[in-house]
Image: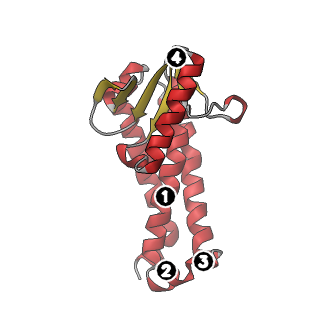
């Protein structure tokens, strides 16, 4: 696994996160009440939302770039309804950062689209979770796989990947603290 390549994929998340915080603090009139009352909540809420949203797309890119026979189908030129990744041209599925990424009514719709597309393509369906406990089981013709089991399946060292992401996340938080320390100290 190429650590430098993973870091290069993750680097833009830092910039987007810091810039989104700046935009929300200085240019988003809809958030004035929060900014005036508790700006540190706005800073960390923006950090969490921006970083995790960007991380979802970066994980797909990491899977394609560093994994074995993985294709990121979520790119504009190859967009496939209900599918994020194709593995070995035999499997098609979705990759979510964690189990809570998709809940409620979106989950059923997402699974329905996944099954429709894999049926049409005559491929096997999977639903992967990037982080958390390792698991791998089949239910209703869908392979549910997560944590270390998923990354091992595609040939990526889970512990090393997780360590790099945690480091980049901490570096980003440090940049936010440096840039907005005056606001965070009150």
Q: Is residue 20 left or right of residue 78?
A: left
Query: Counting residues from the N terminus, which is met first, the one under dot 4 or under dot 3?
Result: 3
Quickly name the residue at label 2.
Answer: 34
Q: Residue at x 55, y 28 (%)?
A: 116
Q: Distance between the Cα atoms at labels 4 and 1?
A: 33 Å
- Do the numbered discs 4 and 2 sit on residues whose CB atoms are within 8 Å? no
Asked whether residue 180 appears in the rendered view, the answer is yes
Query: Counting residues from the N terminus, which is met first, the one under dot 2 or under dot 1?
Result: 2
Q: Distance between the Cα atoms at labels 2 and 3?
A: 9 Å
Q: Quadrant of residue 156?
A: top left
Q: Residue at x 59, y 63 (%)?
A: 20
Q: Is residue 63 left or right of residue 148?
A: right
Query: Counting residues from the N terminus, which is met first, the one under dot 1 or under dot 3?
Result: 3
Crowding around mark 1 (Cα neighbors within 10 Å: few <14, some 14 to 19, many 20+) is few
- Do the numbered discs 4 and 1 sit on residues whose CB atoms are within 8 Å? no
Query: Counting residues from the N terminus, which is met first, the one under dot 4 or under dot 1?
Result: 1
Quickly name the residue at label 1.
Answer: 49
Quickly name the residue at label 3.
Answer: 30
Quickly name the residue at label 4.
Answer: 123
Q: Compared to 40, does 139 lie above or below?
A: above
């Amino acid at each position: 696994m190429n650590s430098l390549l993973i870091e290069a994929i993750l680097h833009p998340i830092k910039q987007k996160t810091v810039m989104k915080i700046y935009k929300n603090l200085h240019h988003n009139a809809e958030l004035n009440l929060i900014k005036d009352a508790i700006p540190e909540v706005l800073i960390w809420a923006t950090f969490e939302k921006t970083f995790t949203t960007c991380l979802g797309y970066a994980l797909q890119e990491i899977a394609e770039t560093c994994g074995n026979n993985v294709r990121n189908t979520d790119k504009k030129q190859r967009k496939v309804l209900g599918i994020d990744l194709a593995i070995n041209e035999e499997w098609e599925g979705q990759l979510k950062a964690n189990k809570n990424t998709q809940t409620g009514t979106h989950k059923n719709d997402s699974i329905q689209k996944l099954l429709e597309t894999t049926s049409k393509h005559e491929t096997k369906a999977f639903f992967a979770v990037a982080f958390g406990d390792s698991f791998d089981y089949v239910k209703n013709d869908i392979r549910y796989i997560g944590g270390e089991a998923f990354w091992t399946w595609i040939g990526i060292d889970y512990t090393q990947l997780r360590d790099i992401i945690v480091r980049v996340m901490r570096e980003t938080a440090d940049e936010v603290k440096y840039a907005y320390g005056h606001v965070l100290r009150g």
